[in-house]
Image: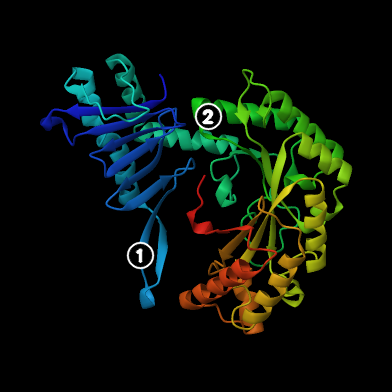
Amino acid sequence: MRKGIVALELDSKDGPSPVYIKLNAPAHSVWLGGAEGYTYDLEGRPFAAFFNERRFRRALDGRVIETVWVTGARGLRHRRVRLLEGEEKSGLLRRFRERVQPVYAAVSAGRYRLRKTGHPHEIQPDRDALRQLLQTIFAWDDARLAADVVAFHRVYRPVSILPPDQYLALYIQMTLGCYYNRCVFCDFYRDRPYRELDDAGFLRHLEAVEHYFGHAIRMRKTLFLGDANALHMPADALLRRFEILNQRYRIGRRAADDRLAFSGIYSFIDAFTGAHLSRDVLTQLTRLGLRRVYLGFETGHDPLRHLLQKPGKTQQVIEAVQNLKQAGVCVGVILLNGIGGRTFFETHLRDSLAALQAMPLDAQDMIYLSDLMVCEDSDYRTVAQRQGWDLLSAEELHAQRQQWLRALRSDERLRHVKVANYDIREFVY
C-alpha cells in the first residue's frame, strides 16, 4: 500500500469522525476525531497512544510508560513519567484494539466515505487494502502480545538504555553487559556478565533480530551496537563485525539496492577505548559507517570521578574526544546533573565546563544533560551516605540545569553544540 494519509467519514453509529489513517511512514497511525491517536508498527504491534493530553509508549518487552507535562512546586513545569501496571496497563493495551474496532467494522461493511482534505499526501486506497491494514492491527489481542514479549526475550537480553536520538535504532547486541561495571551510579548492566559474541553468534543474532521485527524493521533508521561499550572488543574482531554489517545492510549514502538501509552505526564508548583505538582503526570504522559514539563523561571534577569509581581522569576523556574527532567520528558527551549533591555543586559545574571547552566539539556533536536518578538500593546512595552528600531537590536540579544551559549558551566555543535533555525514565525499547 502506498504511503500517505486517508481521511474517512464514518456513519455516526460507528464512532468519532473524521478518522485519519497515516500509512507506512514508517509506521501506521489512526487518529480519531483529531485529538486521539494510536500508532502501530508495520507488523501491527501497538507502539504509542495519545489522548486526553497524555502520551503512552509500549515497549517491545511489554512495559508501558505514560509521559505527561505537569506543574510542580514553585510553578516548575516538568515531565512526569510513570510505569503502568496491572489493570491500568491491560486496559491501555486493549484500547489499541477497542478504539480501532469500530473503524475496522465500518470499513469491512463499507459504511464510510473517503473525505477530501487537500493534504498533499492524501491517497484513496481501495476498501480491501484498508480493511487488511486494520485487520492486521486488530489481530494483536492479549495472547499475541504476550507471545510477542516472550519472542522478544529470546532475541535480546534487556535493552537497558539508549541515547535519546537513538531510541528508534535497530539495537544489535554485539556484546552483553559492561566490561567494567563498577560505576556506583549505574545499575544498567548489573544483571549480566560481560560477554562478546563470536562471529557465528553475531550472525545468528542478526538473523534473529530480523525475524523478530519482520516488516517493522523499517521503523528503525540507524544501527546501535550494544551493550555498554561494543567498541571495546579487539580491533580485528570489531572490524569483522562492521564488515558483516556492511555486507548485510546498506549503510549510509550508498547506491540503492534491495538490502535494508540504515543511515549509520552508533554506539556507547568509554574514555579508555576512545583514547586507545588507533587512528587507522577509527578511520576504517568511519568508512564502514560509524557516525557517532556516546561518552558517559558524567563529571569533569576528578575527585568526584574517583568517588564514583568512574574509570579514567578528565584529561583522558578529553584525549578520547580529540582522537575520535580527528578520525571523523562525532561524539555525544553525557553529563550527570546533580551528581555529588550540594557538596560538589559548584566544582562539578566548573571543572566539567572547563573540560568541555578543551574538547574539539562542533555542530555535529551533542551534549546531554541527564538528571541523576538514584534507586533505593543503589551503590550511589551508599556512597552518598558515607560521604555526607545530600541528594538535590527537584528545585536544585532545575537550578543546576539552568546554570549548565546559561554557561553553554554563552560560551563562544560551545554555543554551537547541540544540548539536549536525557531523561532515562523515558526510555523503553
Locate the N terminus and report the quarter of the image it occupies.
top left
Within-10-Å neighbours for mark 2: few <14, some 14–19, many 20+: some
Which residue is denoted by mark 1 in the rendering?
Answer: 70
Is residue 313 in view?
no
Numbered circle sitting on residue 161: none
| Image coordinates for residue 54, horizontal then vertical, percent | 33, 53
Describe the element under mark 1 as helix, strand or loop. Answer: strand
| Image coordinates for residue 165, horizontal then vertical, percent | 57, 48
Q: Residue at x 72, y 70 (%)?
A: 300
Tally of numbered tags: 2
229 to 11, vertically: above or below: below
Q: Say which of 422 and 155 sits in front.
A: 422
145 to 320, vertically: above or below: above
Badge 1 amino acid? Val
Report whether 349 appears left or right of 28: right
In primary-sequence order, the first of circles 2 and 1 is 1
Which residue is denoted by mark 2 in the rendering?
Answer: 218
Q: CA distance from mark 2 to mark 1?
A: 34 Å
Q: According to the image, what is the colour scheme of the structure? A: rainbow
Describe the element under mark 2 as helix, strand or loop. Answer: helix
The picture quadrant where one finds residue 108 is top left
Q: Residue at x 25, y 36 (%)?
A: 98
Badge 2 amino acid? Arg
Report whether 255 appears left or right of 84: right
